[in-house]
């Protein structure tokens, strides 16, 4: 315990280590600022010449009120909306007609489908193509209602129900809410409302690995300075484990605090268990690298390479599926998979056991004599 406190004190005197710790507060501050802003993946300008209380006006009000990865801005005139599009303030403009309800009634009566809204875009890409589906999903229920009314009027002779009664019946039978709900295998749901927070766990997990590499660098620095000359080589791995424990304990506390502040901490008990396994995996992973690479310069070269590999092969921004063996060697990969996946916990356990024996074996080989 005394040794851990002395090691902690010595680490905190190192400017480079303090700089590594300060990365997370800046990251948390930046993400909180970004998440608090009214921003989205795509910004849509809205306009309708319809009067207040009309169907078009009601639809635009719904767009403005809903929470999603789309950001909506409403304009008073069509010229303002188009000017915002050309000025790159918005990515697309949706223009609803003055009498949307009348247009839908005509379509229902004729049994045909034709455009009832204008979509003006600065460029054509995949994201904007998907946003059009959002607009269609809001207009389609209104067309379905008018079709329902037309059907009832044609099938019932004479005693046609009042409009209010028809609407009540339609609302009673129609589906409400989302047709699809994103859900993980462990039963938790993904609302997808704040995409800024989506990669935060992966980025923090990579930061923990960088902290582990920092511990290895300090250990090699101590070895270079002759601090372990009196310690038998085969016992130096105990010091390495102890140093990693102190470094990663600090990282783990900061990790949990950051997740709590950012609101991504779901089930604390499970989160804590997975985090402890991740820290042990990182300790063994970094120690294996440290035993294989003799010089500090080699570790320094490997750090950016390993960072790029973790960003590319761990499910942070993209999820590659063809490199399972390579991905499983990276501690953040199994951790991120185990957060909501089923069956990955046992692989983390296997990783810990294999990592321990790999460290012991490599240490025995390095100092055999």
Image (cartoon, rainbow, N blue to C red):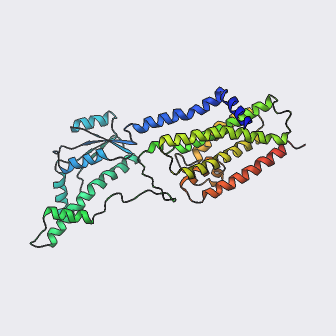
Quarter of the rendering occupied by the C terminus? top right
Q: Residue at x 65, y 29 (%)?
A: 12
Splitting the image into 4 quarters, where does residue 195 fall? top left
Q: As displayed, is residue 34 above or below residue 358?
A: above
Apparent side of residue 341 relative to residue 98 in the rendered image (left or right): right
| Residue 187 shows up from this direction | yes
Residue 1 position within the rendered picture, expressed as x and y whole percent measured from the top left: 72, 38
Instruction: Name the residue located 65 percent from the left edge and 31 percent from the top edge.
Output: 17
Count the marks. 0
Please state which of residues 79 and 248 is positioned toward the viewer in this rendering. 248
Q: Position of residue 224 (x, y in %)?
A: 79, 30
Give the percent coordinates (x, y) of residue 158: 9, 72
Tell me: 328 left or right of 363: left
Q: Quadrant of residue 165?
A: bottom left
- Residue at point 78% right, 42% down? 238
In the drawing, does residue 163 fall left or right of residue 177? left
Residue at point 70% right, 42% down?
286
Residue 364 x %, y %? 84, 46
Closer-to-camera residue (113/342): 342
The residue lying furthest to the front in this view is 2
Q: Is residue 113 visible?
A: no
């Amino acid at each position: 315990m005394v040794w851990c406190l002395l090691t902690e004190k010595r680490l905190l005197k190192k400017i480079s280590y303090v700089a590594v710790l300060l990365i997370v507060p800046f990251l948390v501050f930046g993400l909180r600022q970004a998440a608090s802003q009214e921003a989205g993946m795509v910004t849509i300008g809205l306009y309708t010449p319809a009067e207040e209380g009309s169907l078009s006006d009601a639809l635009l009000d719904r767009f403005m009120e809903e929470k999603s990865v789309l950001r909506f801005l409403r304009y008073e005139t069509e010229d303002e909306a188009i000017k915002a599009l050309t000025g790159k303030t918005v990515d697309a403009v949706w223009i609803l007609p003055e009498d949307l309800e009348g247009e839908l009634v005509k379509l229902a009566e004729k049994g045909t489908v034709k455009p009832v809204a204008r979509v003006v875009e600065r460029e054509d890409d995949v994201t904007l193509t998907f946003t059009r589906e959002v607009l269609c999903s809001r207009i389609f229920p209104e067309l379905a209602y008018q079709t329902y009314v037309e059907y009832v009027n044609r099938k019932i002779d004479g005693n046609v129900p009042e409009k209010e009664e028809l609407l009540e019946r339609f609302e009673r039978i129609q589906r409400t809410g989302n047709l699809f709900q994103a859900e993980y295998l462990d039963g938790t749901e993904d609302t997808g409302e704040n995409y800024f927070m989506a990669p935060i766990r992966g980025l923090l997990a990579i930061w923990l690995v960088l902290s582990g590499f920092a511990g290895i660098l300090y250990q090699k620095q101590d070895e270079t300075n002759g601090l372990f000359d009196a310690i038998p080589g085969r016992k130096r791995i105990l010091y390495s484990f102890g140093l990693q424990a102190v470094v990663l304990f600090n990282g783990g506390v900061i990790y949990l605090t950051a997740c709590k502040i950012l609101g991504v901490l779901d089930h604390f008990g499970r989160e804590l268990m997975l985090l402890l396994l991740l820290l042990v995996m990182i300790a063994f992973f970094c120690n294996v690298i440290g035993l294989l690479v003799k010089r500090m310069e080699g570790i320094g070269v490997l750090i950016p390479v390993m960072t790029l590999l973790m960003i590319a092969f761990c499910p942070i921004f993209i999820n590659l599926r063809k490199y399972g063996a390579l991905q499983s060697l990276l501690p953040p990969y199994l951790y991120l998979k185990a957060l909501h996946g089923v069956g990955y916990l046992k692989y983390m356990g296997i990783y810990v056991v294999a990592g321990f024996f790999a460290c012991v074996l490599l240490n025995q080989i390095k100092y055999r004599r």
